[in-house]
């Protein structure tokens, strides 16, 4: 849709009221067919319009106010012919100029998957698939668990305009991960030759806290061995008999 509009605000010096006059020209395109529509509005009331889809190809009054206007414009042959040709000179012409940047424009999406918060296995969480910087806005995003599509617990935003001819959206999945689970975000878009998938694995690996505790324990054990070794070395140098036992560790 291509739209042009003009507005004129008039202040009456007689009754000191504001009057609004608007002209709105719109081009439509559907499957290669073009349509030109021009509407005239007075104080928010449509009073006359020209529609290229009309078989008559003339201005039509939409209210009592527009009767004289439509009659006057329809007898102005040159003025009327300009409106009849606008579907080609304005709509089709501008559509061909913009087609390469709009209808044929393709930008591939970036896909990232992450949990909404750090969590553990068997704890409820929200897995977020962030799809960004894609064009056009038509896109399909689906969640899979171990190869099976998940439909329950799926939350999604509509495609959001970034303001630079690209979109982004969030598709979230409520889940409680089990050990060995593989969650997959699958994206299909006109810019892609086929679906793009990003996996999130839940292997049951130790948490940061547990790993930290384990490393601390190992560190203490190593320091203990060092201290024991130094003690044995001092005893050996002092001629003290030391018996060694092989411990199964």
Image (tube, rainbow, N blue to C red):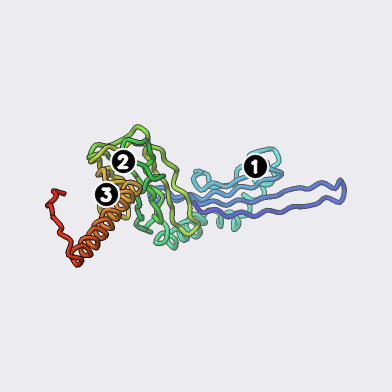
CA gap, disc 1 and disc 3? 48 Å
**Helix or strand or loop: what does disc 3 sit on?**
loop
Which residue is under mark 2? Answer: 143
The 10 Å Cα crowd at callout 2, few under 14, some 14 to 19, many 20 or more, is many
Q: Is residue 178 left or right of residue 91?
A: left
Which residue is under mark 1? Answer: 46
Q: Residue furthest right?
A: 14
Instruction: Name the residue rendered at 31%, 49% in the picture.
Output: 211
Instruction: Nearest to the eye among marks 1 and 3: give it.
Output: 3
Q: Is residue 12 left or right of residue 239?
A: right
CA gap, disc 3 and disc 2? 12 Å
249 w.r.t. 240: above or below: above
41 w.r.t. 227: above or below: above
186 w.r.t. 108: above or below: above
Question: Of the residues under marks 2 and 1, which one precedes in the sequence?
Answer: 1
- Counting the numbered discs, the total is 3
Residue 138 in the image: state x and y as whole percent: 38, 47
């Amino acid at each position: 849709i291509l739209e042009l509009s003009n507005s004129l605000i008039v202040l009456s010096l007689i009754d000191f009221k504001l009057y609004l006059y608007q002209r709105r020209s719109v081009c439509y395109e559907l499957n290669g067919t073009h349509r030109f529509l021009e509407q005239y509005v007075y104080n928010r009331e449509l009073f006359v319009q020209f529609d290229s889809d009309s078989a008559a190809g003339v201005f039509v009054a939409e209210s009592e106010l527009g009767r004289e206007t439509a009659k006057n414009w329809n007898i102005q042959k040159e003025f009327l012919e300009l409106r009849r040709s606008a579907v080609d000179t304005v709509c089709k012409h501008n559509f061909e100029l913009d087609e390469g940047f709009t209808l044929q424009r393709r930008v591939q999406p970036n896909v990232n998957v992450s949990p909404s918060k750090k969590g553990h296995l068997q704890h409820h969480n929200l897995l977020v698939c962030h799809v960004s910087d894609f064009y056009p806005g038509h896109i399909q995003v689906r969640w899979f668990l171990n190869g099976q599509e998940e439909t329950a617990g799926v939350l999604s935003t509509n495609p959001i305009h970034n303001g630079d001819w690209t979109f982004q959206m969030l598709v979230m999945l409520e889940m409680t991960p089990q050990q060995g689970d593989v969650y997959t975000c699958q994206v299909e878009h006109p810019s892609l030759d086929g679906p793009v998938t990003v996996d999130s694995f839940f292997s049951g690996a130790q948490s940061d806290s547990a790993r930290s505790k384990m490393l601390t324990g190992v560190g203490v054990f190593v320091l203990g061995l060092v201290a024991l070794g130094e003690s044995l070395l001092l005893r050996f140098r002092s001629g003290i008999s030391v018996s060694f036992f092989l411990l199964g560790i």
